Image (cartoon, rainbow, N blue to C red):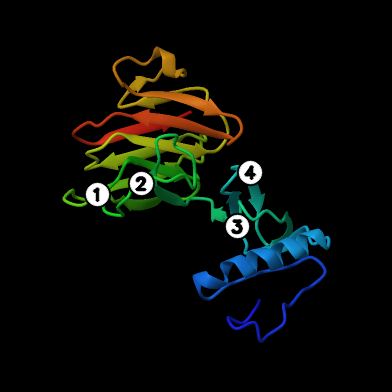
């Protein structure tokens, strides 16, 4: 870690490096230090996870807590782990990619989405933009049959759900089975698809008044 004036040396262990700049004007220097460390052979660092089940945010891979993982260095994809049962609301850009620009204003929601990591019962609020009420989302895993139920209320916008779990055999929306290919959906209706690179089920739900219920089996 470098002091903002460069007065302190960079601290290193054999497998760890971190460059934190206090002000934006020092970012170019921090990037130079980072490149120097990578060129010197620093390629990975340890991530200590508390007990419980966790998911890699970028790949969906499920890992057990209570251990220290060795994670590759990648400036464009910092290690982020989400505890099983977590819900991460997102405002995504047109390509629905993580980290893509979404809008020019933090008060506007372009594509409402939620990353869901099934586990214990959990809930979250969904910001839908200035002037709209908050929506809500809750999830529950049935430990008897392994199914996952997702409930949404007061959602005024179309929503993309990314459920990072095992591939389901079927997905039902408000009691009806959804087609598993986007091409089978008509006029923006609901559908689901499996994203192997994410190890996730992507479920598109159109804007609809009233409670919404999705069940993955």
Of the two numbered discs 1 and 4 on the same chain, state the one appearing first in sequence: 4
What residue does disc 3 label?
52
SS of the residue under disc 3: loop
Q: Which mark is residue 138?
A: 2
Of the two numbered discs 2 and 4 on the same chain, state the one appearing first in sequence: 4
Viewer-side label of 3, 4: 4
Q: CA distance from mark 1 to mark 3?
A: 34 Å
What residue does disc 1 label?
129
- The residue under the point 48% across, 24% down is 193
SS of the residue under disc 4: loop
What residue does disc 4 label?
61
Q: CA distance from mark 1 to mark 4?
A: 31 Å
SS of the residue under disc 2: strand
Q: CA distance from mark 2 to mark 4?
A: 22 Å
CB within 8 Å, label 1 to label 3: no
Viewer-side label of 1, 3: 1
Q: Find residue 96 and report its horizontal and vertical position in percent.
A: 44, 37
Q: CA distance from mark 3 to mark 4?
A: 14 Å
Q: Find residue 41 and report its horizontal and vertical position in percent.
A: 83, 60
Q: CA distance from mark 2 to mark 1?
A: 20 Å
Of the two numbered discs 1 and 3 on the same chain, state the one appearing first in sequence: 3
Q: Find residue 109 and report its horizontal and vertical position in percent.
A: 30, 45
Of the two numbered discs 2 and 3 on the same chain, state the one appearing first in sequence: 3
Q: Is residue 97 left or right of residue 40?
A: left
Above or below: residue 47 compared with residue 25:
above
């Amino acid at each position: 870690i470098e002091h903002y004036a460069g007065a302190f040396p960079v601290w290193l262990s054999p497998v760890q490096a971190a460059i934190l700049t206090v002000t934006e004007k020092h970012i170019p220097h921090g990037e130079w230090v980072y490149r120097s460390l990578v060129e010197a052979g620093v390629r990975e660092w340890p991530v200590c996870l508390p007990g419980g089940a966790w998911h890699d945010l970028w790949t969906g891979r499920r890992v057990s807590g209570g251990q220290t993982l060795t994670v590759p260095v990648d400036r464009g994809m910092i290690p982020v782990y989400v505890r099983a049962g977590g819900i991460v609301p997102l405002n995504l850009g047109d390509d629905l990619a993580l980290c893509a620009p979404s809008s020019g204003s933090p008060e506007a929601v372009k594509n409402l989405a939620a990353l869901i990591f099934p586990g214990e019962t959990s809930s979250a609020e969904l910001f839908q933009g200035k002037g709209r009420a908050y929506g809500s989302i809750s999830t529950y895993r049935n430990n008897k049959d392994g199914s996952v139920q997702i409930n949404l209320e007061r959602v005024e916008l179309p929503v993309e759900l990314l459920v990072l779990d095992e591939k389901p055999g079927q997905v039902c929306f408000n009691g009806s089975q959804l087609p598993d290919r986007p091409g089978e959906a008509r006029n923006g209706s609901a559908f689901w698809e499996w994203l192997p690179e994410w190890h996730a089920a992507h479920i598109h739900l159109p804007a609809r008044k009233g409670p919404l219920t999705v069940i993955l089996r």
